[in-house]
Image: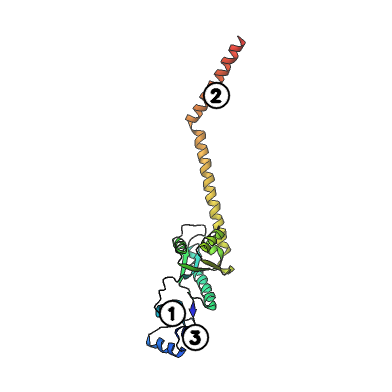
């Protein structure tokens, strides 16, 4: 959603900035306030005031993620960094989403809901501090998915919000998953070896084959 300065809003409405200040005071058209207490307006306010539907306005989303509850403090750092960037660019964030879960987990509810909104063409821009805040592997694929729906992902590349320990945790998780699978395969192989019915079948087959060869040799000798 675009941020409009009082002068820009006044020009659009054909009034003076002083009139906007009076309207703000009387509650006719309330202005928003920036962190530095400056007035600003939104595109949605403008459309609403002139009687046009604002349903086609798409959202700007800040998305922050950490792997564990012990890292919750870093969620605030990510959102604060994104807000500073957005304010400097004159961008209004419609929503800030904070998520807790591994970047290897594709079942994060908030993340999936965000992707659903992307595919419903409700999202204009997603702001993240680093690529792995969104997903650890396959980022390029998800970026292309968003692009198909005219959604842009802005990566701010703030390395401080991508702790190396989290990468280590994710790698350990990968090793653990594959170790469990290898253990399962070994266990399955052991069960096959211990299966008496399979052993009996092999013995019968080899025994029958041996008897057939013995009989054939006896007949040829006689």
Which residue is denoted by mark 2 in the rendering? 206
**Nearest to the observer: residue 76 or residue 89:** 89
Q: Residue at x 55, y 21 (%)?
A: 209
Counting from the top left corner in percent of width and height, residue 212 is at: 55, 18
Outermost residue to the top: 222
Kindly identify which residue carries mark 3.
Answer: 7
* Circle 3 residues within 10 Å: few <14, some 14–19, many ≥20: some
Q: Is residue 204 above or below residue 98?
A: above
Is label 3 or label 2 in front? 3
For label 1, the crowd category at 10 Å Cα-Cα, with few meaning under 14, some 14 to 19 and many 20 or more, is: some
In space, the residues marked 1 and 3 are separated at their CA atoms by 13 Å
Q: Which mark is residue 46?
A: 1
Q: Earlier in the sequence, mark 3 or mark 2?
A: 3
Picture quadrant of residue 18: bottom left
Q: Are marks 3 and 2 in contact (CB under 8 Å)?
A: no
Labels 1 and 2: the sequence-earlier one = 1
Q: Position of residue 177 (x, y in %)?
A: 52, 50
């Amino acid at each position: 959603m675009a941020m409009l300065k009082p002068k820009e809003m006044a020009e659009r409405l054909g009034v003076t900035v002083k009139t906007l200040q009076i309207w703000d005071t009387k509650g006719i058209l309330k202005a928003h306030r920036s962190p530095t207490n400056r007035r600003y307006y939104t595109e949605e306010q403008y459309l609403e005031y002139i009687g046009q539907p604002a349903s086609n306005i798409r959202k700007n989303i800040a998305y922050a993620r950490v792997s564990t509850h012990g890292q919750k403090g870093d969620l605030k750092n990510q959102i604060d960094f994104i807000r500073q960037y957005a304010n400097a660019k004159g961008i209004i964030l419609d929503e800030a989403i904070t998520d807790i879960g591994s970047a290897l987990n594709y079942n994060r509810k908030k993340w999936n809901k965000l992707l659903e909104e992307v595919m419903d063409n409700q999202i204009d821009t997603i702001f993240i501090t680093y690529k792995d805040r969104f997903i650890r592997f396959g980022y390029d694929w998800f970026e292309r998915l968003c692009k198909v729906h005219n959604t842009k992902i802005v990566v701010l590349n703030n390395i401080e919000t991508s702790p190396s320990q989290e990468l280590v945790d994710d790698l350990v998780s990968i090793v653990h998953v594959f170790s469990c699978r290898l253990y399962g395969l070994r266990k399955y192989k052991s069960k096959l070896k211990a299966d008496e019915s399979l052993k009996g079948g092999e013995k019968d087959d080899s025994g029958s084959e041996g008897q057939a060869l013995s009989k054939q040799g006896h007949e040829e000798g006689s």
